[in-house]
Amino acid sequence: MKVLAKKAKLSSRFYQPTTGFTLIEVLVVVVIVGALAAIAAPSWLSFMNTQRVNKANDLIWSALQQAQQEAKKRKLGYSISFRNNNNVPQIAIYPKGSTVTNYWRDLGTDLRIQPGQILIQTNITNENTTDNSSPTYASSPVFTATSKPQTITFDYTGALDLTIKTGNANSTSVQNTNLGTKGLIVVVAMAKPGNPTQAYNIKRCIIMKTILGAVKIGKNENECS
């Protein structure tokens, strides 16, 4: 009996009953987790927005390539037009001279872009033409056979469809007149919360500065303005 009592006494020295966490300990953990979440949330949101803009800009670049390839493949002019319709960015790829109405599609359906989340800006005032201004919100204007604002058109060779004549109207002068110093710019940007027609600070863009249709990708405000 004495031996058993001694063993029980020794065992009790090393046995610590499980009592769980105190209220103060739980509150400390909650505060720490909340603080970490508050720090991480803006960074995560910024990362997701940047990824979304990058992918949307990739879609613009791919659409331009598609229009250019279709022009060369089919040996006829092909156009690509841009607009925001009810705060949803849209593009249309279609044969030159066709009615654009039936070709509009939302940009990045697979990206699950919500209305007012991403917008398109451009400095293209008419077909293959800019007034050398900074890109602005691509509204939803009327497109006709003779008036195609916010539109890039390729000829059957895949170059920009611009009339180049002999004499003074050589390729350089036509390029300078139509494309200016900035070139044709199409911008994809995050829309400001509560103001879907104004661009936020995350921007990407496609810049076309030559009549051959060469494309440059801009990745900041300076390049996309």
Image (cartoon, grey):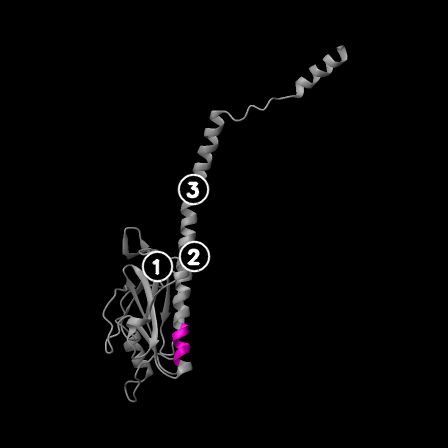
Amino acid at pointer 1: Ala
Mark 2 residue crowding within 10 angstroms, few (<14) / some (14–19) / many (20+): few
* Secondary element type, mark 1: strand
Q: Is residue 124 above or below residue 4?
A: below
Q: Earlier in the sequence, mark 2 or mark 1?
A: 2
Residue plotted at (34% across, 75% down): 94
Q: Is residue 41 above or below residue 113?
A: above
Quadrant of the image containing the N terminus: top right
Residue plotted at (54% across, 26% down): 20
Q: Is residue 169 highlighted in magenta?
A: no
Picture mark count: 3
Magenta segment boundaries in residue numbering? 65-71
Mark 3 residue crowding within 10 angstroms, few (<14) / some (14–19) / many (20+): few
Residue corresponding to mark 3: 39
* Secondary element type, mark 3: helix
Residue corresponding to mark 2: 51
Question: Which sits in the foreground, 139 or 207?
Answer: 139
Q: Give the mark toward the camera: 3 or 2.
A: 2
Amino acid at pointer 2: Gln
Amino acid at pointer 3: Ile
